[in-house]
Image: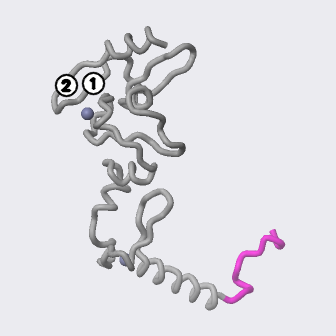
Amino acid sequence: MRDWTDRFLAKIRDSEGGCWEWTGHIKPNGYGQVRVGDRKHNVHRLAYEVLVGPIPPGLVIDHLCRNRRCLRPDHLEPVTQRTNVLRGEGPAARNARSTHCVQGHTFDAVNTYVRPNGSRDCRSCNADRNRRRRQGVTRAPARQRPSLAAA
Ligand SMILES: [Zn+2]
Ligand SMILES: [Zn+2]
């Protein structure tokens, strides 16, 4: 294992912000990749495991510096997928940073429901939706509902 570790470390260069940037192969998603034997690894995960220790099962590596090429151990932190999504720049993360839902209800601890994918739901809006759905169902006469048996 010794020689690939040396080759691996030789492909790291210091960069702005104190990052250690990977100069080897970069995948289209922006993360570095390295081949060890016949297996391909994400370099930031590999660097963490080599330099720090095993990544706990189920956790992903978050770049605290937001530089995907970086593999400096103290710029990396193992977190749950949900934390990673909330810290990122995707729609779920932007949504998570807003303080009110589209109807103007406050996203506070009581009114906010966090879905398993990390996005948030407004409990007030949900309650409104459910109320309308229930009313809609009780008002609709049974004979007007489409019947699968008749088709
Ligand atoms: Zn970094
Ligand atoms: Zn709402």
Q: Position of residue 123 (x, y in %)?
A: 43, 78
Q: Nearer the viewer, residue 151 or 26?
A: 26
Residue 146 sits inside the magenta stretch: yes
Residue drawn 42% across the image and 78% down it = 125
Q: Quadrant of ligand 1?
A: top left
Name the residue type under label 1: Glu
Q: Position of residue 104 (x, y in %)?
A: 29, 77
Q: Which residue is mark 1?
A: 21
Is the residue under label 1 in contact with that under label 2 (CB below 8 Å)?
A: yes
Name the residue type under label 2: Ser
Q: Position of residue 65 (x, y in %)?
A: 25, 39
Label 1 environment density (alpha carbons within 10 Å; few <14, some 14–19, many ≥20):
many
Q: Which residue is mark 2?
A: 15
Q: Quadrant of the C terminus?
A: bottom right
In the depicted structure, whether residue 120 falls above or below residue 104 = above
Q: Does the closest atom of ligand 1 sit within 8 Å of the Cβ of label 2?
A: yes
Seen as rendered, the residue at the extreme top is 3
Q: Position of residue 131 (x, y in %)?
A: 52, 86
Seen as rendered, the residue at the extreme right is 149
Q: Does the closest atom of ligand 1 sit within 8 Å of the Cβ of label 1?
A: yes
The residue segment tinted magenta is: 141-151
Residue 98 sits inside the magenta stretch: no
